[in-house]
Amino acid sequence: RKEVEQDPGPFNVPEGATVAFNCTYSNSASQSFFWYRQDCRKEPKLLMSVYSSGNEDGRFTAQLNRASQYISLLIRDSKLSDSATYLCVALSGGSYIPTFGRGTSLIVHP
Amino acid sequence: DAGVIQSPRHEVTEMGQEVTLRCKPISGHDYLFWYRQTMMRGLELLIYFNNNVPIDDSGMPEDRFSAKMPNASFSTLKIQPSEPRDSAVYFCASSPSTGVYTEAFFGQGTRLTVV
C-alpha cells in the first residue's frame, strides 16, 4: 500500500464548478503536506503548502485532517487552465523527504 | 537562475545499451533527488543526495541502476544494461536545506524509451 493515496480520476467538471480532491496518508508521523500541480508532459510544480489550520490562496483552499489522516484541495470557480494533475505530498518527520501520491487528474471543460 | 537542468530531454535506446541521464541542480541547493514517473506507479523516489552524499538509495529498482554526484553542480543516473521496462520519465529535483522542507524544484525531465 502506497504511503500517499489519491483517487486518480479523472474529474471532469464544467467551467465555474467547484471541485474537491482528497488524499490519504498512512504514516501518522507525517508532519508536512503539500499540493503540487503537474501539467501534461511537464514537471511538477508546487501549488501550495497545507497548514494545520487550513489555508487559502485565491480560488484554492487546502485543509488537513490529522485525525482521519487526509488532506484536501478545494478549487472554486474552475478555469480551463486548472486542467492538470494534482499531486499530494507528505513528509515524514525527521527525513523531510517528500513522498508523492500518484496524482488526481482534473479536466475542466467549457 | 535557470532552474534544474536535465539532459537529454528525450532518449531512445535499444535494450541492453547503457543510458546516462544528467542533472544540474539549482546552485546552493543541498538536496538532490532522482524520481521516476510512470502511469502505473506514479512518481517514485529512486535516490537522494545531501551535500553530494547518497543518503537513501532504497528506491533504486536493481543493480542495473546507479547514481553519482561528483560535485555540488552535477549528478548522473546510469542504467546498464537498459530494459524496456525502464521506459519512463526521469525527473531530477533539488531543494535547499533549511531545516524544514520548503519546496522541491524539478527539472523538465528526461523521457526514456527503451526498445
Image: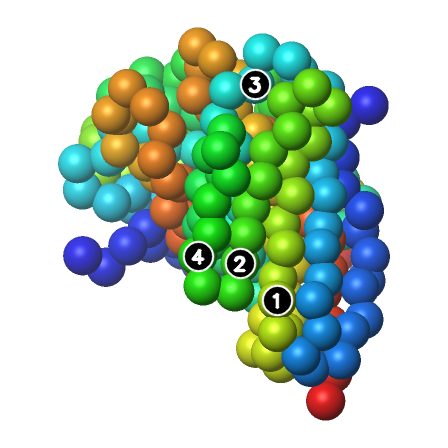
Across and down, in percent, residue B36 comes to 61, 41
Q: Decide: is A107 above or below B22.
A: below
Mark 1 or 3: in front is 1
> Is label 2 in contact with label 1 (beta carbons under 8 Å)?
yes
Judge whether residue A46 can be spotted in this image: yes
Judge the density around disc 3: few (<14), some (14-19), many (≥20) Cα neighbours within 10 Å: many
Mark 2 to mark 1 CA distance (whole Å): 7 Å
Q: Decide: is B18 above or below A66.
A: below
Judge the density around disc 1: few (<14), some (14-19), many (≥20) Cα neighbours within 10 Å: some
- Write down the quadrant of residue A107 in the picture: bottom right
Residue at the disc numbered 3: A30
Identify the secondary structure beneath mark 3.
strand
In terms of depth relative to the viewer, which is nearer, A81 or A42? A81
Judge whether residue B63 can be spotted in this image: no
Residue at the disc numbered 4: A57
Q: Hey, what amino acid is under mark 2? A: Phe
Chain of the residue under label 3: A
Residue at the disc numbered 2: A60
Who's the residue at 40% across and 17% down the image? B54
Residue at the disc numbered 1: A76
Across and down, in percent, residue A64 comes to 59, 33
